[in-house]
Image: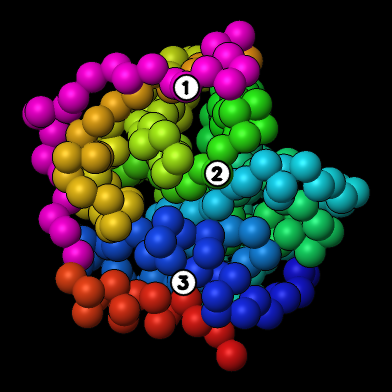
């Protein structure tokens, strides 16, 4: 079993753009949720899906310049009640791969690497290779262009009839990675079907918010979230010191509603640990 390493409030909130966590707009999403602060990332875990609803990270060149030994240690998250948490046996023989939503390779120290193996950071996926490639590309954006980047990743449950593995771990139809670079205003998201294909779509943050009923970046305006940049899909697309080009304005998707200062403060308080 893994050990919880206490994180100071400030360090916990720094994983979010302007210290503001993604906000669950749809009330049904909030049922049995657990805000979890880890070393190097934060999670909003669902005891209904038995997966995270989102995982947030702040990536910087300094952070990614550090490395630590990797030790595979998948473990149950003991901060979650036993009836709501996923287990090792849920994935055994399921035919699905355990995807660490906050990647191990993003972690700069042993504690963070250990935390990334918490099952609260895991989603069952069919094709790990395409996700590993995108994680590499996102790190490449940060390192090659020397920019800070915020990324929110998670599952997309878009079918009425969802399949499960083990004792109720829900398999998503797709997964996403939404990014924002404050220095350049670059914004957009990857939409990845949860199947054997290598198809990846670049979409707007508003497109995702309409699917998810989650305000992914509450401190950004609707205008900003409709902007969509031509995000790189492979290492070949990474250009040193060249800004990512603008692609299109999404005028069709329904961005999520804005979040009040009061609701933001309440959510921030849920991510504070003594």
- Image side of residue 130 versus residue 89, left or right: left
Q: Earlier in the sequence, mark 2 or mark 3?
A: 3
Residue nearer the viewer, 84 or 236: 236
Circle 3 residue: 35
Query: What x and y, as percent, mark residue 53?
Result: 40, 55
Determine the secondary structure under disc 2. Answer: loop
Query: Residue 251 magenta-drawn?
Result: yes
Q: CA distance from mark 2 to mark 3?
A: 24 Å
* Residue marked by disc 2: 148
Question: What secondary structure is marked by label 1?
Answer: loop
Q: How many marks?
A: 3
Q: Is residue 50 left or right of residue 257?
A: right
What residue is at 54 percent from the left and 52 percent from the top? 57
Crowding at mark 1 (Cα within 10 Å: few <14, some 14-19, many 20+): few
Q: Which residue is mark 1?
A: 243
Q: Is residue 63 left or right of residue 272?
A: right
Q: Which residues are magenta?
A: 236-259
* Residue at x 64%, y 59% (from the top left corner): 40
Residue 162 tag number: none
Is 178 situated left or right of 251 in this image? right
Distance from the alpha carbon under mark 3 to that under mark 1? 34 Å
- Along the polypeptide, which appears first: circle 1 or circle 2? 2
Figure check: 35 above or below 26: below
Residue 86, image quadrant: bottom right
Q: Is residue 211 above or below residue 270?
A: above
Residue at screen point 17% across, 50% down: 256
Q: Residue at x 67, y 64 (%)?
A: 39
């Amino acid at each position: 079993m893994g050990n919880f390493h206490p994180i100071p409030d400030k360090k916990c909130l720094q994983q979010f753009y302007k210290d503001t966590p993604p906000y669950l707009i749809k009330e049904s999403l909030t049922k049995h949720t657990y805000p979890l602060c880890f070393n190097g990332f934060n999670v909003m875990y669902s005891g209904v899906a038995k997966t995270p609803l989102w995982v947030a990270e702040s990536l910087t060149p300094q952070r990614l310049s550090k490395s630590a030994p990797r030790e595979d240690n998948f473990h149950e998250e003991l901060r979650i009640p036993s009836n709501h948490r996923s287990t090792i046996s849920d994935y055994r023989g399921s035919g699905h791969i355990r995807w660490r939503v906050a990647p191990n390779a993003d972690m700069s120290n042993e504690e963070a690497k250990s935390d990334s193996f918490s099952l609260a950071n895991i989603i069952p996926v069919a094709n790990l290779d395409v996700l590993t490639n995108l994680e590499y590309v996102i790190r490449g954006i940060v390192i090659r262009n020397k920019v800070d980047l915020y990324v929110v990743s998670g599952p997309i449950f878009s079918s009425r009839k969802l399949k499960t593995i083990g004792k109720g771990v829900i398999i998503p139809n797709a997964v996403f990675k939404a990014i924002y670079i404050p220095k350049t205003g670059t914004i957009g998201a990857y939409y990845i079907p949860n199947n054997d294909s290598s198809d990846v779509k670049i979409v707007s943050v508003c497109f995702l918010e309409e699917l998810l009923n989650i305000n992914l970046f509450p401190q950004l305006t609707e205008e900003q979230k409709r902007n969509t940049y031509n995000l790189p899909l492979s290492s070949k697309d990474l250009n040193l010191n060249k800004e990512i080009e603008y692609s299109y304005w999404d005028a069709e998707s329904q961005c999520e509603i804005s979040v009040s200062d009061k609701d933001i403060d309440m959510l921030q308080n849920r991510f504070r640990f003594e």
